[in-house]
Image: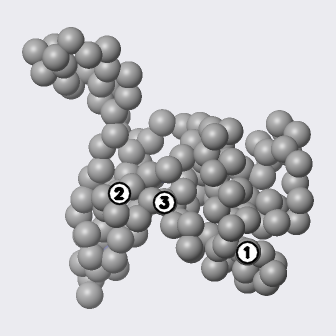
Amino acid sequence: MSDLLERLRGRGWRLTAQRRVVAEVLNGDHVHYTADEVHAKAAELLPEISRATVYNTLGELVSLGEIMEVSTDGRAKRYDPNAHHAHQHLVCSQCGTIRDVHPTGDLLAVLPAEERFGFQVAAVEVTYRGMCPNCSAA
Ligand SMILES: [Zn+2]
Ligand SMILES: [Zn+2]
């Protein structure tokens, strides 16, 4: 559980009604919504919430380090509340379902020294692609 709301309360982030619905929409596991999806879901809870407020709140949460921007298809930027636990993504090439996954082993270590070009390598992002059970059953 990403318990984003709990973390935000813990750090004393001022929870207005609008910020709260954005945080509620992003609370949970395997959550990777585009800004438009966050806005649509937030508007179900608080119809008057504006797109600008949603975008501003997302930007603020990213700069606080409480959500991450991810892009698994190279196009839409998605927002991921699982920002405190290193994880990688498993993506269905058919329907776009995204799962947080935790490969075993040290992904940094698999890059050989001669492929590092003198970089101090600090992070790695891996996207596993394939077909989810729903799509492969169809
Ligand atoms: Zn699928
Ligand atoms: Zn994720």
The amino acid sitting under disc 2 is Thr
- Count the marks: how many? 3
Q: Can residue 86 be seen from the camera position used here?
A: yes
Which numbered disc, 1 or 2, marks the residue closer to the eye?
A: 1
Residue on which the image places disc 3: 78
Find the residue positioned furthest to the front: 52
Q: Would residue 94 be found to the left or right of residue 45 on screen?
A: left
Residue 14 in picture, x, y percent from top left:
88, 48
Residue where numbered disc 1 is placed: 50
Query: Please, is residue 96 above or below residue 15 in the view?
Result: below
Q: Can you give x and y, in whole percent of width and height, for residue 73 in the image?
A: 31, 62
Q: Which residue occupies 82% across, 61% down? A: 20
**Depth check, front residue: 134 or 128:** 128
Residue drawn 64% across and 62% down? Answer: 55
Q: Residue at x 50, y 50 (%)?
A: 69
Is there CB contact under 8 Å for labels 2 and 3?
Answer: yes
Q: Secondary structure at mark 2?
A: loop
Mark positioned earlier in the residue sequence (3 or 1): 1
Q: Nearer the viewer, residue 53 or 3?
A: 53
Q: Is residue 62 above or below residue 31?
A: above
Disc 1 marks which amino acid? Ser
**Residue where numbered disc 2 is placed:** 72
| Residue at disc 3, CB closer than 8 Å to ligand 2 | no
Within 10 Å of the Cα at label 2, are there few (<14), some (14-19), or many (20+) other Cα atoms? many
